[in-house]
Image (cartoon, helix red, strand yellow):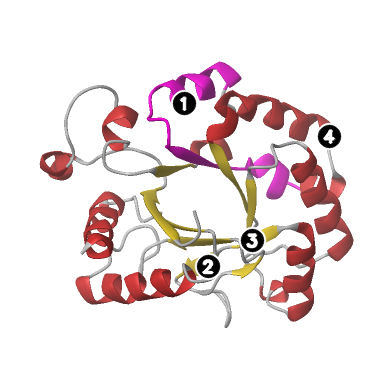
Amino acid sequence: MRGRILVGTAGWSVASRYFAAIPAGGTHLERYCRAFPVVEIDTSFYRHHQAQTYARWTQSVGKEFQFAVKTPRALTHEGELIRGKNADLTDFLREIEGLGPKLRVLLVQLPPSLEFDGAAVRRFLRRLRGGVRATTALVCEPRHASWGTEKVDALLKDLGVARAAVDPPRWGDDARPAGDPRLAYFRMHGSPRIYYSGYGAERLDQLRKTLKHSSRTSEQVWCIFDNTAHGHAIGNALALRMLLTR
């Protein structure tokens, strides 16, 4: 699996303007998985899904398809990361068991105001690691500049947690993956207007080169387009996939 580059989007909604590029038939997820090998479930950030719902999604996709799941904001944005409410975390981990071995990535996106606290981070990430399969990678997307240090990078490596590379970057080193080198996880939020802007051909080709470079050292490279507000994510993902297969 070393060097494999996997491209997908946050969610599986397919705008009508891309219907001609993706085979029709079935649910939105069934249609989506004919074009892409991975998807990031971001609705889990806002609300709970039952384990049966996750299990139904796994039955809608192919054998090799993989899911990333975003941890709920109740854990990361409303204080539980620091206070450690075990009930909320236990419920979430029980729900995502429905994905079984298709759960490949657990994404922890942190609020911009959350400064690095080594003890709290170590406690929370260890708790997450203990609640998922060994085959599930942990990815952290911090958004405060205090996370951009060698000390933090060393801690994430020690915990086996990758740090997401994001666009647009929020601080100096934010655009490159760090932490556990086994997984390079890129989140493309849209630039210059986050969530709304699409990426042009030149920027996508630059991204292709970046992903290829990361594939030399990482077992897997994920690239997730999160610029979904105007439907650009699917189009950008399709275009990047074509560039990578040339």
Residue type at mark 2 is Ala
Which SS class for mark 1?
A: helix
Task: Give the alpha-carbon distance from disc 4 to disc 2, as whole Å.
Answer: 29 Å
Number of residues whose C-alpha sits closer than 10 Å to that of mark 2, classed few (under 14), some (14–19) or many (20 or more): many
State the residue at coordinates (37%, 49%).
8
In this view of the protein, can residue 224 be seen by the observer? no
Number of residues whose C-alpha sits closer than 10 Å to that of mark 4, classed few (under 14), some (14–19) or many (20 or more): few
State yes or no: residue 2 in magenta.
no
Residue type at mark 3 is Ala
State the residue at coordinates (75%, 45%).
129
Residue 61, compared with residue 152, is above or below; it is above
Task: Give the alpha-carbon distance from disc 1 to disc 2, as whole Å.
Answer: 27 Å
Residue type at mark 1 is Thr
Task: Give the alpha-carbon distance from disc 2 to disc 3, as whole Å.
Answer: 9 Å
Which residue is disc 4 drawn over?
Answer: 86
Q: Nearer the viewer, residue 108 or 104?
A: 104
Q: Nearer the viewer, residue 232 or 67?
A: 67
Q: Earlier in the sequence, mark 4 or mark 3?
A: 4
Determine which of the numbered discs, if any, sits on residue 162 in the image: 3
State yes or no: residue 53 in magenta.
yes
Tag 1 near tag 3, CB within 8 Å: no
Which SS class for mark 4?
A: helix
Q: Which residues are magenta?
A: 50-79
In this view of the protein, can residue 20 be seen by the observer? yes
Determine which of the numbered discs, if any, sits on residue 165 in the image: 2
